[in-house]
Amino acid sequence: MSSMKRIIECVPNFSEGRNPENIEKIVAPFRGKKDVKLLDYQTDEDHNRMVVTAVGGPEGLKAAVIEAMGCAIDVIDMRVHEGQHPRMGATDVVPFIPIKNVSVEETIAFSKEIAEEVARKYSLPIFLYEKSASRPERQNLAHIRKGQFEAMATKIKQPEWKPDFGPQKIHPSAGVTAMGARMPLVAYNVNLDSSNLEIANEIARKVRHISGGLRYCKGIGIELKDRGLVQVSMNMTDYTRTALYRVFELIKIEARHYGVNVVGSEIVGLVPMQALMDTAAYYLGLENFSVDQVLESRIWE
Amino acid sequence: MSSMKRIIECVPNFSEGRNPENIEKIVAPFRGKKDVKLLDYQTDEDHNRMVVTAVGGPEGLKAAVIEAMGCAIDVIDMRVHEGQHPRMGATDVVPFIPIKNVSVEETIAFSKEIAEEVARKYSLPIFLYEKSASRPERQNLAHIRKGQFEAMATKIKQPEWKPDFGPQKIHPSAGVTAMGARMPLVAYNVNLDSSNLEIANEIARKVRHISGGLRYCKGIGIELKDRGLVQVSMNMTDYTRTALYRVFELIKIEARHYGVNVVGSEIVGLVPMQALMDTAAYYLGLENFSVDQVLESRIWE
């Protein structure tokens, strides 16, 4: 049945955001490949960095990623790379995100399979991160990348920084790469009818994970000066475990304490269909609802 | 930009549900055509009828429908047709449903374009119905079809039953066809914690259009004997005008009067993504949300 088609998203970050020819060489492997779709690529000259967004079936995506990483090694020399964004490799980081008919576990396995292959093929050290991490301290990309390319030649020699795949020395021109599975992020903001930033910050502290709130929620208070409002601005790091409606209802409850009201919310950028299906299903008390009942999911398969 | 791809759904009903060879001949034009996807076809031997569900861009769909109607004329003879379902033509009725980047108005125009062409090509009388109807009394298919194939030779001679396209006499073997644009139907049921069918019926009367309720809602009470519950069982005939959450909240309000509670709801069969997006957006108070933000809508374009 066609509904079993598997889709993974890949958002590799490359350390090239200036030279158009090099950019095109790195992006090219994601074009015109069977079962792979290049959704977007954004370059930043100040960062000297490019973020590619592609989706596809495991096989096609694997071939495209490996090829693109080879192109990055060909055209980028980290020894002369300059840019404002922290970076440690020609291909800096490669997250894989389960989108459809793929479990997190399968995505982790997929990321390790690619990591093993690129490490061998290019003699490139790979650190597994996020859900693929081999130890807790490697979940966090910032922690792996600390010191950046310049410090990595020394850092990698320490026993605790032995890479998960590849040699225990940096690739001379391409450095090292982090690779792993993560859930889709949803940028979700809830607006309050108050201009008091401290209230938004206090509510953010109550609902976010780090200070006692929901497991897959990061958040801060933000001032929307032109509207005279404040906002709890969040990153939902796993909407399948911490649902949007749960944080929305929780903020409504916390807001009462300050005598303020939730006046609306917003999703910034992309959101997986399932996140909003779960929301609709919760509020309507839907029984036995499946995403296969969505007309478009039949059409688009 | 690829997001402007237009998609129309077509659900033609043919008066053949028994002969596999004939069935395949009629379905064949929807297969393997560029830009057309056959989603489903269901045959019923008792009804001696087949319902085809296909989606596609206007051009491809137009060609497929016209070809399939020609095949139906070739293989079906209404003079010898028997079946339990009311019918008036070899191709009985052809609804067109706007799905993506197509307005109702454009779908009406599209249905008329096809009606004009098949009428001319096959000397087949066409009645425009639903949103394409040329007069109010032709909106209702049952009204057009009253008397069925057997009465149609006489009925069509009456001035008020002059067809919208084609000759004012039936096609000898293929009868007449109704054709028109309609919105997608959503079968939506709301469950009550009561075993009293009369309560479900009374609430249905309050929320459905015909007896004073919401404009695009049809509904009746139903008993779910095995669960000891009753249900308000509805057809939402235009979810863009009468939203699912509106009828859900209204039923909650009406249920209070009887001291019963809404315990859940269900969507039967397919539902357009937008109907559930609207629901999520309502309950979360989403500002400036667009269906283009749904990740899958980017992938599947």
Image (cartoon, coloured by chain):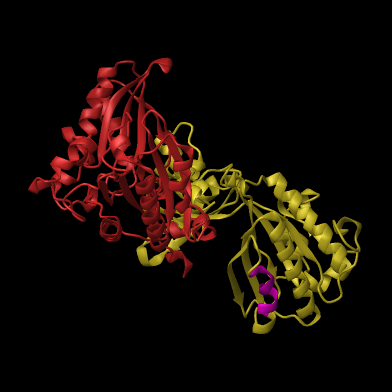
Chain colours: A red, B yellow
Q: Position of residue B1 (x, y in %)?
A: 59, 43
Q: Is residue B207 left or right of residue B123?
A: left
Q: Is residue B18 left or right of residue A75?
A: right
**Range covered by the magenta-colored residues:** B23-31
**Residue B256 vs residue B167, the one in the foreground:** B167
Dividing the picture into quadrants, the one containing residue B121 is bottom right
Placement of A167 over or under B63, stated as above or below? above
Name the chief secondary structure element in magenta: helix
**Residue B298 vs residue A57, the one in the foreground:** A57
Q: Which residue is at a point 34% across and 48% down the rendered structure image?
A: A73
Return the residue found at the far left.
Answer: A159
Is A281 part of what is drawn in magenta? no
**Residue A213 at least partly seen:** no
Is B30 part of what is drawn in magenta? yes
Dividing the picture into quadrants, the one containing residue B151 is bottom right
**Residue A71 at least partly seen:** yes
Placement of B174 over or under B182, stated as above or below? below
**Residue A2 vs residue B236, the one in the foreground:** A2
Q: How many numbered marks does the figure carry?
A: 0
Placement of B149 over or under B19, stated as above or below? above
**Residue B147 vs residue B27, the one in the foreground:** B27
Q: Position of residue B57 (x, y in %)?
A: 66, 55
Q: Position of residue B104 (x, y in %)?
A: 68, 46
Dividing the picture into quadrants, the one containing residue B72 is bottom right
Q: Which residue is at a point 29% across and 55% down the rendered structure image?
A: A122
Q: Position of residue A98 (x, y in %)?
A: 35, 54
